[in-house]
Image: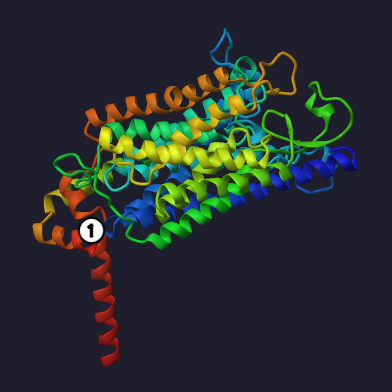
């Protein structure tokens, strides 16, 4: 048993194609990739919204001046 | 891979593209240094992260759908064409070719070469909008230009069977239009909605200079971009192919390097022209900008971009002159547009990439008028009208228009720009304090440890 379809390399390489694990489940793997990608956007967007709202609320004249002078 | 020659050609091609990909990584390194050098200290970390995260986002989406678009869209949906599902099938993310496959050594490296162009397109936009765009908003644009719009233009105008090549005679060997004009046009569309940084314009509308906080980092960044650009040029070629495999009108048995349209060229030719157009840009912009370092270096880049459409065929002196003229016009246009339309392009990306790329495509139509756009029979020859139409498609249709529409939507939902208080205080304020607090804490703890 082998997840990649080969349990030894006693083969003619001319006959060898894909060698990644779990062949046949490509659709499912792509679905996982899509969820990971879109999920990341959602998490990042929510977190950024909170951070920006807090930063805007906590902005003080003095600290802002110091940051501007920092250039 | 039957036969030693075929095996050698395949391995050489695989290694060739792999090397170009590594070189092109330097473009992104250079862009990051450039952007951080231009930004003010209060925004360094966010500026860096905004650009770095383009890498994973565009990579994932280019794997999921960008690469498929390139193969399926060359004739979609123009002149009755349709999606080419057959050509696209091997390039779907579910295809075994898009994975560890011992019978296909080329798809992975070829995909990666195109992917690095995608990063570049997105990164060009990223630089122009620093210090006021929400990262989340920019990252949506990065996916759109990197994995959708630029690759549609590549399918149409940078593919041996693209409709623009067949019908218009479109020729853009090193991507004046398909990368630079579209990215510059896209940046313009975003900037027009986003607006300038606070303080960029005086109350009477006079633009103020916002100098780079670190000119040396900017300099080093752009030199690294030049270096990566070598890899970009090499990646635009097919390194070695026989007339038999091309299957067009070429006769005989002489193997050659080709451009992306499978028309013959050589690394020697593009090395001449890369360096001569760079030189033209540096020399001319040094004069027009009165020795301004920022613009002189950017002008060098604009010189290459301006000549890139025809750098597979130009004479080196032609590359020099074109590389000199284009950045001067781009420089003048940048300052005109900045004053007239109050456009704050922090890194001059619209000028250096957009205007220069547009002009480069148009100029190639005149200089290469009548030259074959392809080795295949029945394709239109290179001509000024086809090139002008192509430049419009790149800059406005696939660049400016979608960017403007999407940015208007983001603006309407209030998710485009950071709040003004945060812009004044700087995006790194919280990180800056966390950093200072962490230093204070560890320093104090270390002193305590020393005492005990």
Note whether B253 is above or below B390 in the view shown.
Answer: below
Task: State the residue at coordinates (74%, 43%).
Answer: B13
> Where is residue B149 shown, x and y percent of the image?
47, 28
> Where is residue B428 shown, x and y percent of the image?
26, 56
What residue does disc 1 label?
B430
In the rendered image, which quarter contains the C terminus of chain B?
A: bottom left
> Where is residue A50 shown, x and y percent of the image?
21, 46
Query: B374 or B101, which is in the foreground?
Result: B374
Task: Judge left or right: residue A28 versus residue A60.
Answer: right
Task: State the residue at coordinates (64%, 17%).
Answer: B166
Note whether B234 is above or below B150 in the view shown.
Answer: below
Query: Which residue sits furthest top?
Result: B80
Image-quadrant location for residue B244: top right
Query: B176 or B24, which is in the foreground?
Result: B176
The answer to whether one can see residue B227 in this image is yes
Query: B339 or B451, which is in the foreground?
Result: B339
Query: Which residue sits furthest bottom?
Result: B451
Task: Judge left or right: residue A46 versus residue B220.
Answer: left
């Amino acid at each position: 048993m082998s997840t990649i379809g080969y349990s030894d390399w006693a083969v003619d390489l001319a006959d060898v194609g894909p060698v990644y694990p779990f062949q046949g489940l490509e659709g499912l793997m792509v679905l996982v990739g899509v969820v990971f990608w879109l999920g990341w956007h959602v998490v990042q967007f929510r977190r950024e919204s909170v951070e920006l709202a807090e930063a805007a609320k906590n902005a003080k004249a003095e600290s802002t001046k110091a940051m501007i002078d920092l250039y | 891979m039957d036969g030693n020659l075929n095996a050698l050609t395949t391995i050489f091609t695989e290694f060739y593209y792999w090397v170009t990909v590594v070189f092109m990584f330097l473009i992104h390194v250079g862009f990051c240094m450039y952007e951080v050098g231009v930004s003010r200290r209060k925004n360094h970390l966010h500026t860096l992260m905004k650009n770095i995260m383009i890498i994973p986002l565009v990579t994932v989406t280019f794997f999921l759908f960008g690469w498929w678009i390139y193969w399926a869209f060359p004739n979609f949906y123009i002149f009755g064409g349709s999606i080419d599902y057959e050509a696209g099938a091997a390039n779907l993310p579910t295809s075994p070719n898009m994975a560890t496959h011992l019978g296909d050594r080329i798809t992975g490296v070829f995909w990666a070469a195109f992917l690095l162009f995608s990063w570049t397109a997105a990164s060009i936009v990223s630089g122009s909008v620093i210090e006021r765009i929400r990262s989340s908003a920019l990252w949506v644009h990065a996916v759109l230009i990197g994995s959708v719009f630029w690759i549609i233009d590549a399918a149409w105008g940078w593919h041996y069977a693209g409709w623009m090549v067949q019908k218009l005679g479109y020729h853009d060997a090193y991507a004046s239009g398909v990368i630079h004009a579209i990215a510059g046009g896209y940046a313009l569309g975003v900037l027009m909605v986003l607006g300038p940084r606070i303080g960029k314009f005086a109350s009477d509308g006079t633009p103020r200079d916002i100098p780079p906080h670190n000119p040396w980092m900017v300099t080093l960044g752009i030199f690294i971009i030049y270096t990566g650009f070598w890899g970009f040029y090499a990646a635009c070629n097919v390194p070695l192919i026989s007339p038999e495999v091309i299957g067009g009108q070429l006769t005989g048995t002489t193997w050659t390097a080709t451009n992306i349209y499978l028309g013959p060229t050589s690394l020697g030719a593009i090395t001449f022209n890369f360096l001569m157009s760079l030189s033209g840009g540096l020399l001319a912009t040094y004069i027009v900008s009165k020795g301004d370092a920022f613009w002189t270096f950017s002008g060098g880049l604009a010189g290459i971009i301006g000549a890139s459409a025809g750098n597979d065929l130009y004479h080196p002196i032609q590359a020099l002159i074109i590389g000199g003229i284009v950045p001067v016009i781009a420089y003048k246009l940048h300052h005109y547009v900045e004053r007239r339309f109050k456009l704050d392009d922090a890194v001059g990306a619209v000028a250096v990439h957009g205007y220069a790329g547009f002009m480069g495509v148009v100029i190639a139509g005149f200089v290469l008028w009548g030259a074959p756009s392809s080795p295949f029979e029945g394709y239109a020859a290179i001509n000024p009208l086809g090139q002008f139409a192509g430049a419009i498609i790149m800059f406005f249709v696939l660049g400016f228009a979608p960017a403007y529409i999407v940015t208007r939507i983001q603006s309407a939902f209030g998710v485009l720009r950071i709040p003004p208080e945060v812009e004044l205080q700087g995006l790194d304020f919280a990180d800056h304090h966390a950093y200072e607090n962490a230093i204070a804490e560890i320093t104090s703890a270390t002193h305590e440890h020393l005492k005990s």
